[in-house]
Image: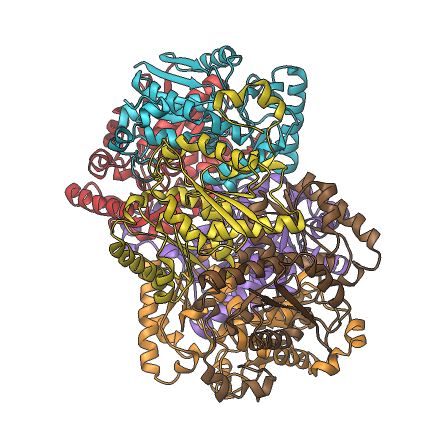
Chain colours: A brown, B orange, C yellow, D purple, E red, F cyan
């Protein structure tokens, strides 16, 4: 059965669209079809909470479009998992994101995991997410390599060197048995790290793809999907119509 | 010294503007000036995460405008505290919101506090906030009265009756010594509850006002304010200019 | 690519082998091949820790045999996840078990999950597992239906009735948005429950199968697998040989 | 409206009375009147739990006297917050203390806070307080500068140097975004630290004063005050009379 | 080897001295000698934090006297464990108290324990102690029987009836496998409860006695005793002399 | 009253039997009789979870034999506390083990404790045990000295040197006030460490012996023992007979 997945790069730049798509295609199930989109306008990375907020409506629109166009899953391609919960609230398809997917794997891969981030700025919000996902006790540490999102792919040798050092430190000093690369733009490094460091290294693009495939298959086979009571209970269609929200915010509700 | 505070009702309706303003004016410091705004377009309540997301940019715009127009503080008037963290990231004024302010008071008012919400739907996100603010161990329970935001002021007698019952149950069964009313539209009830139930009852409009006055005074006297490293580190102005974010999103950055 | 999975019913009885195999076959990927085994001798259920301990060596032998016979994954078919950690320590294949797999799914399916158990006796050990997996904060409650493992399939109508009641109570009183059936022999009920209760219901046989398929595919595609440092670091072969452990305990180490 | 506040230096020495009063007067509201008292007999600092215990009755007497003499609030001027809870139990005025007040501010000023203490000896009890106040998850670290209470104001240059170093380390190594000076006698340093280190620095004398003013205003405006059920439920006057406790312990109950 | 233990009833009444001594004598080691003291003046129970505070100096004096008179251990006979930490700070003998001793036993007697208290008022402080001792995760519940300290021994039948009911509820509804009687004056009931309820019931007088005997024997055999660094680091003798603390507070330091 | 205790060295080697027995005899109560056994076959240490699993049935057999032969207590002599819970489930005698016993002492000896282990490999499982026992908040750190179980007694000078260094580091850097030696084969070092480092050092052989004596005495005097509901509820004898478990596994049930 074909699985259609939409990867959303929630930024106003398409420079990562092709390499991420290539990357995803190399690890997908054969009958998975992946499309990658990004936006015309917007910040070129989401290091700041403000930038995330700016892209909120665009991300939600994209998720709704994915639903309308019969995608089985949408992936929000940023390790902050921005608007993941909102996306599940308003759609009936599978929605995943890097951080949640990574920890859902890490849980069975080793005792404790560390997350290697670009800049220290990212840590508070990611730490809040770890707590929100409930996994604080399995979390070993954050390690920062002092690079911004847009630096990772510029001087790949330097990036690799720093990732290796940070990974080594996490293993030796913090008790990490599993490493997570805490940014989707840290793609392309996990294989070498895994080989050299001898521990599983979770790539932030691969994790949400494979977890999405997993959840879609689960849904197809067992009808299991995001709960629609409580946290993901959707807003009533009547309100959305009555209040003209579709028109005002340019969202195609159905 | 005059303190100018902007209360933002982050919804597409002005029906609560006047009563909330009256309410706030009755408890403010003499030299505090309060303005209340709401938006032209948008959902009429924020019970759903989707609705919050829709109002994100509007809230942030309003905070920036408050800063430009020399307000000392902005208050985001919804108990989910939507975009509180983002607002602090992008501005240099005091920003408060109901949930955080309420717990910063509750901490010294009694051993444990309960939050009385309208609908069960609200609980997961509010519970995540309690954890984020770090106060899970001081938290007794949520109690729901099965009313939506727009119901609270319609049949005030019924609302009062249910609030009393829920408060009583929280005290007798959950060990609450302090009650928090978990919605800004639950205004107008705390006094009677306080009197009848014999415990402090925190009103979700009063809490962020008084906490804002407190933080503004603290800033004026000691220069103490939201930290600008880490979580609230602002995005670089250069990026905002280079990427045309002001224009695209209609935000006045300075 | 064909995926070979060995399901181990860690009890001295084959009565569940066929129905569980049928159940698994109905939800597997097309190119997954599933074998189900149980043991000649041993307790007929594992409700007691003592019974688990008795089956320890048998389980580990079976995992080693699975590895030698080129299975991609072994599943330990008991919701206590007995000897899961030990199995990963001594083998290089994927090993999963119901509780860990269920929570790795539940994490993305809703805010909080409840586990419906047969007898109260099971709760302490399962609670310890939830803590060990790190997910205490996402956990809503245990609900017991006062039935032993061997009762579930005897009077299926009664079982279904009690599961429904327990599920309803977990949803309405404990805040569960996701239900987990806390015993592999609670198979065959999740579909109806899901339909009637309107929330995802995780079946304890399906969860570890799908999670195993997921991890095997992940390993095939990215080489990601259980970390071999720290918790799952294997014992040195030399010790095993020198101490005659293979012979003494009847384990085929390689 | 005039607010009368009594600052209690709970030691047997008046050497800090004047400088602390000056310090407080420089940051108070205009219509706040502050009196500072200390005791004739007793230890000259409270670094040891034993010393605290010795001052217990004196502190409580002073709080009762404050109540009788129409003070609006009493402040217990030691970062261990000694007898804070007891004071609230027996009086109807606002009572604050440095540690609780500091964390009630820190909660909104940044993601995590560190506390800079004089000696390591202080840490266990302060850590217990952080837990008691419920804020362990927002707490980054303790940093000790190896000075006793009586050393801070002797060689102020040395003190400042060490505070700067400790603050820097807390920021760079422990992830602190807010600093708290963990002793009332560390007064007079926060401004320079704040300027140099670029993060909010909470002074342990200013925090409980401003928080007291805040709570008094809150009480005047909304009648909100320390809950009188549970933790702060007062002892029955009849017992106190019947058992001659006033006479025996020299406490003026009313 | 003879072990001399001083039981301190930290109240201004000797009515419980004889029955508690009889109770203790019935379970002690043969070569343990127990003395029981109480005070001339003071509250007749310690239900309020204020009452505890009043007895602080008396308790500490008694512990110092015990040390001087060659007692091996002192026991502070109140389930709030008042001044336990202070007592260890200033003495070199073993000091125990009911709550800490009870949980140090409960930890190995079953999965979770409940504490049966007299009045709800007691709960907040006891809950803080459970957290301080680190055992929150092993704690099932408090159950109150709505009786004050002085009621327990008045109508023993009624007391027993309520204890039985509370214990039953803790077992059936809260998951308790072990019960703790949360007041030293709840003595004389554990045996019957244990028999009827079929779970271990820890008596608050017996626990600290047996734990004291245990720690004294441990000290005699291995020199292991309360650590004298950090939390229990004693104040310097020089300060105590220089500041005349012995004279002022009537404490015999040596 | 004579107390008979069986120490089980759960390994296939008797080399530690005599020195451990000597060690225990030097600290026991006079009327305690200690027997030490080990097994003919099996791994010579239990550093791996696999090795523990291999010894499971042997350990349980030994506990049952101890019960049949009227021992008052059995001690499982490995710091992983292997099969402690299972042993309590199937027997009616006191069963203790090093880790649980050590923390039940440490709780009253100082604020925080550190555990000095041989190899890092041991940490994850021990950390899980600390959490299971509920004492994570009182736990300071693990410190590893990079030695295997079989190395400790080979070059005792080197072992001592490393233990001292690790202990010092735990005290100075991690805030430990109490040290625990995290392996039964680290015997013979605690006295010197205690003297030199000035903090209590808990020996992993002495702790479970003294705690066993304590629990046996408690049981003799008060009938208090491991709860037989919930976690330690024993399997029904009927099942054991019907399923031939005694014969199959060579266990003498009674």
Left or right, residue A152 beside residue C144: right
Left or right, residue A193 beside residue E210: right
Tell me what residue is drawn at x 54 percent, y 25 percent.
Answer: F183
Residue A213 in picture, x, y percent from top left? 58, 60
Q: How many marks?
A: 0
Q: Is residue F43 visible?
A: no
- B199 lies above or below D248: below
Tell me what residue is drawn at x 58 percent, y 65 percent.
Answer: A3
Quarter of the image containing the C terminus of chain F?
top left
Q: Is residue B4 visible?
A: yes
Q: Quadrant of residue B209?
A: bottom right
- A32 lies above or below B164: above
Closest to the observer, B212 or F218: F218
Closest to the observer, D230 or C190: C190
Tell me what residue is drawn at x 40 percent, y 60 percent.
Answer: C176
Q: Quadrant of residue A61?
A: bottom right
Closest to the observer, A18 or A163: A18
Residue D223 in picture, x, y percent from top left? 42, 71
Residue F165 in picture, x, y percent from top left? 67, 27
Q: Quadrant of residue C38?
A: top left
Left or right, residue C117 beside residue C109: left
Residue F238 in picture, x, y percent from top left? 24, 32
- A165 lies above or below A85: above
Quarter of the image containing the N terminus of chain F?
top left
């Amino acid at each position: 059965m074909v699985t259609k997945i939409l990867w959303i790069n929630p930024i106003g730049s398409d420079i990562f669209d092709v390499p991420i798509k290539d990357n995803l295609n190399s690890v997908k199930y054969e009958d998975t079809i992946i499309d990658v989109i990004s936006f015309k306008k917007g910040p070129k990375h989401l290091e700041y909470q403000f930038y995330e907020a700016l892209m909120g409506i665009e991300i939600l629109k994209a998720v709704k479009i994915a639903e309308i166009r019969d995608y089985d899953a949408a992936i929000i391609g940023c390790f902050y998992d921005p608007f993941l919960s909102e996306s599940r609230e308003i759609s009936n398809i599978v929605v995943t994101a890097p951080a949640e997917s990574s920890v859902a794997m890490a849980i069975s891969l080793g005792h404790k995991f560390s997350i290697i981030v670009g800049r220290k700025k990212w840590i508070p919000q990611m730490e809040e997410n770890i707590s929100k996902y409930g996994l604080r006790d399995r979390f070993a540490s954050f390690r920062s390599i002092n690079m911004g999102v847009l630096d990772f792919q510029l001087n790949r040798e330097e990036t690799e060197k720093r990732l290796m050092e940070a990974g080594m430190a996490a293993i030796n000093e913090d008790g990490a048995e599993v490493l997570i690369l805490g940014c989707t733009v840290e793609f392309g490094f996990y294989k070498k790290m895994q080989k050299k460091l001898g521990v599983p290294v979770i790539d932030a693009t691969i994790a949400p793809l494979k977890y999405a495939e997993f959840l879609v298959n689960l849904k197809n086979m067992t009808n299991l999907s995001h709960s629609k009571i409580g946290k993901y209970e959707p807003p009533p269609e009547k309100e959305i119509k009555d209040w003209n929200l579709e028109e005002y915010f340019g969202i195609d509700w159905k």
